[in-house]
Image: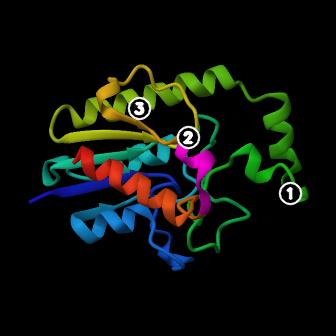
Amino acid sequence: MTKILLVGDSFAADWTIKNTTYSGWPNLLAEEFKVDNRAKAGVSEYRIWQQLSNCNIKNYTHLIISHTSPFRIPVEEHPLHGNDLLHNDCDFLYEDIKNHKSLLCVKEYFEKFFDTDYAKFVHQLIIEKQIAYVSDQCKVLHLHHMKQDLNFIPSRSVLDFSDVFVSHKGNVNHYSKQGNQIVFETIKKWI
């Protein structure tokens, strides 16, 4: 029996909490396979590591990791999204906070002090830790939905959906109904 562990960010989270207009690709996947979806909207790669490390990989045949931006900063509690059912575990990302007057100090940090090279370096280290943790215990797929450099991961285990995201943006998992279907069908072929 195929048992899938899904970890990641909002591109993989269960959006039925807020939007049931159409099914997202994780829900389409769950209609055909046994899926344990631990993904949360707006989380950093560190939080994705926590999702993964809190699971016994031996209980799954497949692991899908939906990677996030290297520029998300983990926070204990996001002051804007604490009561949001979908984003209640959200971390800081410049695009999310840049227009909020209550977070001017965070905006200033991003604009004046944030080191993008360091953030990319730490992001890669966390992903390498994820890879080592799984260590051939199950079949692993790495997803990204926005252009990012994941060339340190063997290409046979990476799916780049950035072109699908650009051409099929929508309200569930950031994709339109057609975009979710494309992502689902592509992942289904990998399984």
What's the CA distance linking mark 3 and mark 2? 22 Å
Tell me what residue is drawn at x 58 percent, y 58 percent: 174
Q: Residue shown at 55%/59% (left/top)?
A: 175
Residue type pointed to by label 1: His
Disc 3 or disc 2, which is closer to the eye? 2
Q: Is residue 42 magenta?
A: no
Residue sticking out furthest to the left:
1
Mark 2 crowd level (few <14, some 14–19, many ≥20, 10 Å Cα)? few
The residue identified by callout 2 is 163
Q: Which sits in the foreground, 30 or 74?
A: 30
Name the chief secondary structure element in magenta: helix
Find the distance from the CA under tag 1 to the CA under tag 2: 30 Å
* Left or right side of 72 for 101: right
The spot of residue 42 in percent (x, y) is: 58, 54
Q: Are marks 1 and 3 in contact (CB under 8 Å)?
A: no
* Mark with earlier residue (1, 3): 1
- Rounded to the nearest angstrom, the CA distance separating label 1 from label 3 is 30 Å
Magenta part of the chain: 163-170
Mark 1 vs mark 2, foreground winner is 2
Residue 40 seen in this snapshot: no
Q: Is residue 118 visible?
A: yes
Between 187 and 13, the one lying in front of the other is 187
Q: Position of residue 62 (x, y in %)?
A: 21, 48
- Amino acid on which disc 3 is placed: Ile
Q: Residue, x 44% and y 20% (percent of image)?
A: 151
- SS type, badge 2: helix
Q: Reply above or below: 67 against 158.
A: below
Residue denoted by label 1: 100
Residue named by callout 3: 127
Measuring from the top left, give residue 76's x and y in whole percent: 60, 54
